[in-house]
């Protein structure tokens, strides 16, 4: 729950404001006095990191939009103009392009943290679903952003992904030409992708507000998965969590800077430095790394419609996680069997990512199909059964006890009821 | 703030101050590229490089208009009458006092080179128009003489002179 | 505990299949050999361009490559920019003036030619792509970003190491390999009509005829003119053309990394100090 209002506005101006629009009080109760579990580890800093990255992408994006031209004849050239002529243009472009990768890296870590510690469980189901919506919005935004430089990969990725919609029976082809604004990917497509790419991050910001609101209603989860029982279990968000987040952010920025300044094209594909040519298909069409697992799932299923459905359900199924996982125990720390299946899932997800980067031939296809089947089995078969049959470890009595260890943990009932 | 013991307040404070200061420096440094990117970029600056104009096709009494840095520039080959009129004006009576010599280059007083933007609100005045054998701005009626000086109407200043120099008698470099 | 065994079997089986398939595909990749690693002055976190090399490379581009390949995104003023070939503004101006640039239309509505200025870009050898395609059957690509537009699969585990060693020179290595890779085809290889055999070009049939030969370009600094030397110099020049701001990027990168290390360190100790009250 949000803390009691301990906020005392300082100074005449803040007292005047507080009566009329209590932003000071809101910020204080949400980010200063807000009770935060004292045992959060560094995996909990990624929420703050994601907020920072959203800000970075929006600011660099708005600034890049001052110099970019969304026209098929001029787009590639305008990006090169940014790289060569605009003051610090190269820096802004590399920050924005690598920032997208860092945004997804932090997003996936944040997601896996939630899966491991059961942050999706009651009462945080809506919080989790808002997160899945945020992932979908990020995927859409990233896809449209990648089209904008109008390189070979931009054009052909746009062609492949928009063509997926033709799998929809009856209305598929109409939807595709509606998306294109023409008979193939062309100038109308580029122009509207630019408009939507500018819009969606602000939609993301709005959903982030809902996400943080839902979080503050339920309170943070923590590595033990048990709720705070007293004030001893929590600390005020500022300065404790604020500083920990800041340090985590500093280390994250070191990794970010490594990419931006030293290996800025490592995560990209060299083919995107070739101007788009509708007459020549690149030898391999590969999306950016953060889409690879879903790309692998799409290609693994031999039927066009079911492949598309597989791609969509691979993301959508995560929204059902709160109900698919039947365990009464939240955190994997006390679920030794689930922990193993979790890591297998991570390996499968990373493996699917690797397979997505390789040509869809030979042994790669067979393994991709196995991994795809396992991916869905994890959600639909393993998790529901696991919660019912697993023998969990005894939970500690409180968060403080788990951190300071001053009492011997009394074994709690291990299955079903908590 | 954390309530630690006050055993070494100066050392703790130093750490907090140092962290805050370094973070502040970083924030300020991060602002630099964001603000600098709006300044004219290298290609704009290059496109605004000085231009050379050949004056030989411009006959006496005629004028041409060229563009430099996006601004229109009138180059008039003045007639004897226009030059004498400009020199005869009582400078102290002008709203923006300037002699004809100050508005032309020595030894080339038959050439008037002015930026064709009205100093009132920025419209382009018409050349060889108005009551003073100079320029007339149709927007609000400002009138300039044959040396481009404001004589009548709402404009406060004379037409601006671009930086220019004569390379030869028939070629100037603007910028 | 049966599930644990099943989990282990799945992981093991998957790992073996994945590993063996990587080996299978590694053999296919050897069809086109990977370009050999070259040593470049600009590689690594402290890399810089060798100005002499860039100037030699410019000469090779001017005298050889520019007959077919445009360099649209480089303008003459870039030759005087910091981090580049290091010409003075006057030298860049006179180099520009040596070119005839199409301009216009004039008052008569005609296009005309005039000497180049600093703001002009290197002119293309063809008025448009269609002319190029008609002349050669395929339009020779523009070279402005060629060093970033080419590369080769590094494969596992090299792509992991590359992240830490900052290896970014796939493009330059590839270009150098192509330029020096015009060897005689093996006996059983059928060269497609109108194309040429190149050892490193995927598929081995390249449309470009061998552009370089020993002694073709005479270097002003007396460096010996061999195909390998020309290839190195023009590749370095093209790498600069693909990213003229590289030196600034690495220099500012060092400042940012040091700053972030200091800031992260300070934040770490501050965090520890503040949290000591709780632990």
Image (cartoon, coloured by chain):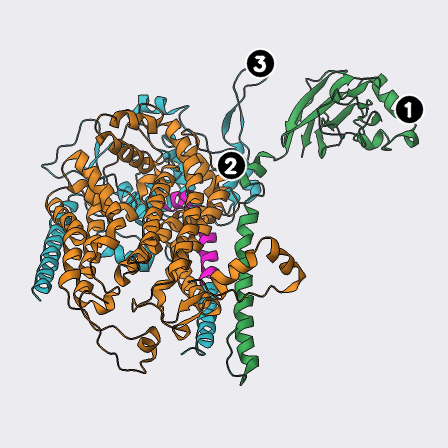
Chain colours: A orange, B green, C cyan
* Relative horizontal placement of residue B43, taking residue B101 as reference (left or right): left
Q: Judge whether residue C1 can be spotted in this image.
A: yes
Magenta residues, start to end? C235-257
Estimate how packed mark 3 is, as few (under 14), some (14 to 19) or many (20 or more) residues with alpha carbons within 10 Å: few
Q: Report which residue position mark 2 lands on.
A: C95
Image quarter (top left, top right, bottom left or bottom right) of the C terminus of chain A: bottom left
- Work out how far the residue at label 2 is from the one at label 1, CA to CA, in angstroms: 49 Å
Q: Chain of mark 3?
A: C
* Residue A102 percent coordinates (x, y): 37, 53
Q: Judge whether residue C221 can be spotted in this image.
A: no
* Relative horizontal placement of residue A402, taking residue B124 as reference (left or right): left
Q: Report which residue position mark 1 lands on.
A: B88
Is residue C33 on the magenta stretch?
no
Is residue C245 on the magenta stretch?
yes
Q: Nearer the viewer, residue C114 or C131?
A: C131
Disc 2 + disc 1, Cβ < 8 Å: no
């Amino acid at each position: 729950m949000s803390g009691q209002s301990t906020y005392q506005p300082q100074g005449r101006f803040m007292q005047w404001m507080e009566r009329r629009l209590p932003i000071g009080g809101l910020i204080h109760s949400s980010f200063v006095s807000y009770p935060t579990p004292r045992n959060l580890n560094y995996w909990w800093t990624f929420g703050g990191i994601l907020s920072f990255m959203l800000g970075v992408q929006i600011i660099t994006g708005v600034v890049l939009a001052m110099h970019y031209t969304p026209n098929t004849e001029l787009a590639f050239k305008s990006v090169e103009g940014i790289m060569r002529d605009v003051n610090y243009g190269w820096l802004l472009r590399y920050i924005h392009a690598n920032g997208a990768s860092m945004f997804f890296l932090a997003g996936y870590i944040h997601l896996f943290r939630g899966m491991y510690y059961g942050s999706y469980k009651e009462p945080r189901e809506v919080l989790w679903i808002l997160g899945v919506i945020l992932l979908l919005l990020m995927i859409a935004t990233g896809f449209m952003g990648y089209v904008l430089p109008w390189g070979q990969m931009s054009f052909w990725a746009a062609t492949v992904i928009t063509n997926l919609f033709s799998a929809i029976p009856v209305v598929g082809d109409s939807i595709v030409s509606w998306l294109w604004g023409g008979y193939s990917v062309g100038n109308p497509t580029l122009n509207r992708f630019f408009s939507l790419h500018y819009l969606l991050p602000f939609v993301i910001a709005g959903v982030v507000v809902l996400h943080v609101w839902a979080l503050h209603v339920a309170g943070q989860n923590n590595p033990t998965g048990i709720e705070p029982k007293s004030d001893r279990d929590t600390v005020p968000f500022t300065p404790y969590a604020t500083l920990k987040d800041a340090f985590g952010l500093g280390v994250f920025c070191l990794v970010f800077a490594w990419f931006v300044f030293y290996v800025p094209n490592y995560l990209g594909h060299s083919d995107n430095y070739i101007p788009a040519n509708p007459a020549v298909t690149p030898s391999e069409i590969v999306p950016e790394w953060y889409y690879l697992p879903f790309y692998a799932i799409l290609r693994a299923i031999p039927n066009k419609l079911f492949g598309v459905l597989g791609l969509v359900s691979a993301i959508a199924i995560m929204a059902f996680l709160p109900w698919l996982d039947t365990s009464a125990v939240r955190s994997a720390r006390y679920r030794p069997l689930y922990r193993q299946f979790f890591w297998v899932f991570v390996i499968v997800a990373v493996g699917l990512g690797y397979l997505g980067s390789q040509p869809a031939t030979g042994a790669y296809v067979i393994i991709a199909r196995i991994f795809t089947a396992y991916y869905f089995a994890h959600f639909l078969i393993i998790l529901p059964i696991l919660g019912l049959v697993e023998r969990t470890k005894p939970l500690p009595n409180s968060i403080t006890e788990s951190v300071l260890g001053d009492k011997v943990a009394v074994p709690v009932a291990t299955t079903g009821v908590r | 703030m954390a309530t630690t013991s006050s055993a070494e307040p100066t050392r703790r404070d130093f750490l907090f101050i140092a962290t805050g200061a370094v973070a502040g420096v970083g924030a300020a440094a991060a602002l630099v590229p964001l603000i600098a990117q709006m300044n004219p970029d290298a290609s704009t600056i290059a496109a605004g490089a000085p231009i050379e104009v050949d004056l030989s096709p411009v006959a006496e009494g005629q004028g041409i208009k060229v563009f430099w840095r996006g601004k229109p520039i009138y180059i008039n080959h003045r007639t004897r009458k226009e030059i004498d009129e400009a020199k005869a004006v009582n400078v102290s009576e002008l709203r923006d006092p300037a002699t004809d010599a100050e508005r032309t280059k020595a030894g080339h007083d038959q050439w008037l080179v002015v930026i064709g933007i009205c100093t009132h609100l920025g419209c382009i005045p018409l050349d060889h128009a108005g009551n003073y054998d100079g320029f007339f701005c149709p927007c609000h009626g400002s009138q300039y003489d044959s040396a481009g000086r404001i004589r009548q109407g709402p404009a406060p200043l004379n037409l601006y002179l671009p930086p220019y120099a004569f390379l030869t008698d028939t070629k100037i470099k603007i910028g | 505990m049966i599930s644990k065994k099943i989990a282990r079997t799945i992981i093991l089986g998957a790992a073996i299949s994945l590993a063996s398939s990587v080996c299978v595909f590694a053999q296919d990749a050897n069809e086109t050999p990977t370009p050999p690693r070259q040593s470049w002055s600009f590689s690594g976190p402290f890399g810089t361009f060798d100005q002499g090399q860039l100037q030699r490379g410019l000469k090779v581009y001017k005298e050889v490559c520019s007959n077919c390949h445009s360099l649209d995104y480089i303008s003459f003023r870039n030759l005087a920019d910091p981090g580049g070939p290091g010409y003075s503004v006057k030298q860049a101006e006179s180099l520009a003036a040596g070119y005839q640039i199409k301009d216009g239309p004039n008052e008569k509505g005609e296009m005309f030619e005039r000497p180049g200025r600093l703001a002009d870009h290197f002119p293309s050898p063809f008025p448009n792509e269609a002319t190029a395609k008609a002349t050669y059957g395929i339009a020779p690509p523009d070279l402005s970003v060629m060093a970033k537009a080419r590369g080769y699969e590094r494969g596992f585990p090299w792509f992991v190491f590359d992240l830490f060693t900052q290896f970014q020179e796939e493009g330059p290595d590839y270009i150098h390999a192509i330029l020096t890779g015009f060897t005689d085809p093996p006996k059983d290889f059928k060269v497609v009509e109108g194309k040429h055999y190149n050892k490193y070009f995927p598929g081995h049939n390249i449309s470009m005829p061998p552009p370089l030969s020993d002694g073709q370009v005479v270097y002003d600094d007396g460096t010996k003119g061999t195909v390998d030397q020309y290839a190195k110099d023009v590749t370095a020049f093209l790498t600069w053309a693909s990213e003229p701001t590289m030196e600034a990027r690495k220099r500012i990168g060092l400042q940012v990394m040091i700053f972030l290390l200091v800031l992260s360190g300070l934040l770490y100790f501050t965090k520890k100090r503040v949290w000591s009250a709780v632990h």
